[in-house]
Amino acid sequence: MGVKEDIHAQIVGGLAGAEFPIATPEELLAAFPNGAETTCKSGDVEIKAGDAGQVLTADDFPFKSAKDVADVIVERAGL
């Protein structure tokens, strides 16, 4: 599994218990197990949930599933 797929799977896993739709960045951070400090790692790549604000925009919300969140973050992070 490559870095992109690994990070994607970790984001989806981190949001496994979340209630969707998620309408705001604050709701998204609250949905992660450790909030903004939730960290996904693969090799030398490390992404914190709190960093998502750098790649997400208001137009991305609401998110309908964990896969949607992971798709957008991984794509925009350039992994």
Image (tube, rainbow, N blue to C red):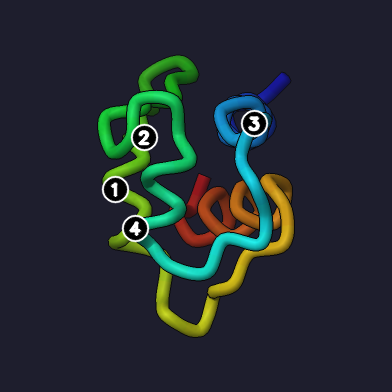
Question: For mark 3, does the 10 Å Cα neighbourhood hold few (<14), some (14 to 19), or many (20 or more) residues?
Answer: few
What numbered label is drawn on residue 26?
4
* Mark in front: 4 vs 1: 4
Q: Is residue 43 left or right of residue 6?
A: left
Q: What residue is pinned by disc 3?
A: 17
Q: Position of residue 33 (x, y in %)?
A: 44, 25
Q: As shown in the figure, which amino acid type bears the numbered disc 3? A: Gly
What secondary structure is marked by label 2? Answer: strand
Q: Residue at x 49, y 19 (%)?
A: 42
Q: What residue is pinned by disc 2?
A: 47
What secondary structure is marked by label 4? Answer: helix
* Mark in front: 2 vs 3: 3
Q: Is residue 35 left or right of residue 13?
A: left
Q: Residue at x 48, y 41 (%)?
A: 31
Question: For mark 1, does the 10 Å Cα neighbourhood hold few (<14), some (14 to 19), or many (20 or more) residues?
Answer: some
* Mark in front: 3 vs 1: 3
CA–CA distance in space, label 2 to label 3: 20 Å
CA–CA distance in space, label 2 to label 1: 7 Å
Task: Work out which residue is located at the far bottom of the displayed protein and give it.
Answer: 59
Q: First in sequence: mark 3 or mark 1?
A: 3
